[in-house]
Amino acid sequence: MGNGFPFIDIILFAMVAAFLILRLRGVLGRRDGHEGHRRDPFLPPNNESAEDKVVALPDRSTAEASAAPANGEAMTPLEAGFAEIRNSDPGFDPKEFSSGARLAFEMILGAFAEGDTEALKPLLSPEVYGNFARAIKDREEAGEVLKETLVGINSSDIVEAFMEGPVANVTVKFVSDQVNVTHDRDGNVISGDPESSVEVTDFWTFGRDTRSRDPNWTLVGTRSLD
């Protein structure tokens, strides 16, 4: 009899342990590696390598842009363009883009007036760069000097956004006050008025290949209102 008590204790402990295991399974659920109902969003899919652990989380601004407005109205063409760009470039932010476009506008105007092709090259598409470089060369060969002063940018508004294949395109309307004067080789004014500024309206289109790791946009087209 005395040797029976330890055996009974073992049985009791085993029963208690089994009861606790069943309770835990009821609360937490059974995990056998094939449940598939929840996945850690910060881990890559099983078919990705360990080097592909940077997962693009859903962009809230993209979802908001691609959804219809709460009032049921359809998106404007510009809003639809933003949504289309965000589908390929979730990091696209119109406000940040506008700030960068204003800076690029100032830099490009200044570099063109100074004939600085090295500064222009990374800011322009090859086609636009070729046109700018040709104009600078023609000006230099004629002995002309362009003095261009950007008095101020009155407004800069995005008026168009669209995808062209993998290339995102955004057009900005710049309204600025400028003093543009061209002198001949003898210093005589041949165009412009050095004493007054004029309001100039430009439409500049910037583009970026969304497949590229380079986040910079380049000027791909220009036009002005006469």
Image: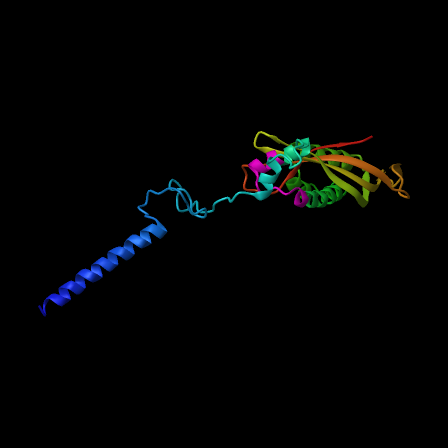
Give the x, y percent position of residue 115: 74, 41
Picture coordinates of residue 187, whole percent (x, y): 87, 41
Determine whether, in the image, residue 85 is placed left or right of residue 113: left
In the rendered image, residue 106, in percent from the top left (x then y), is placed at 74, 44
Q: Quadrant of residue 206?
A: top right
Name, please, the residue furthest toward the bottom: 2
Which quadrant does the N terminus fall into?
bottom left
* Residue 175 part of the magenta-drawn span: no
Residue 144 vs residue 11, the one in the foreground: 11
Can residue 185 be seen here?
A: no
Residue found farthest to the front:
1
What percent of the width, then of the height, locates residue 64? 60, 40
The answer to whether residue 103 of the structure is visible from this angle is yes
Residue sitting nearer the eye, 29 or 79: 29
Residue at x 81% of width, y 41% of height: 176
Residue at image location 62% in from the left, 34% down from the top: 68
Q: Which residues are magenta?
A: 83-97
Residue located 66% across and 43% down the image: 97
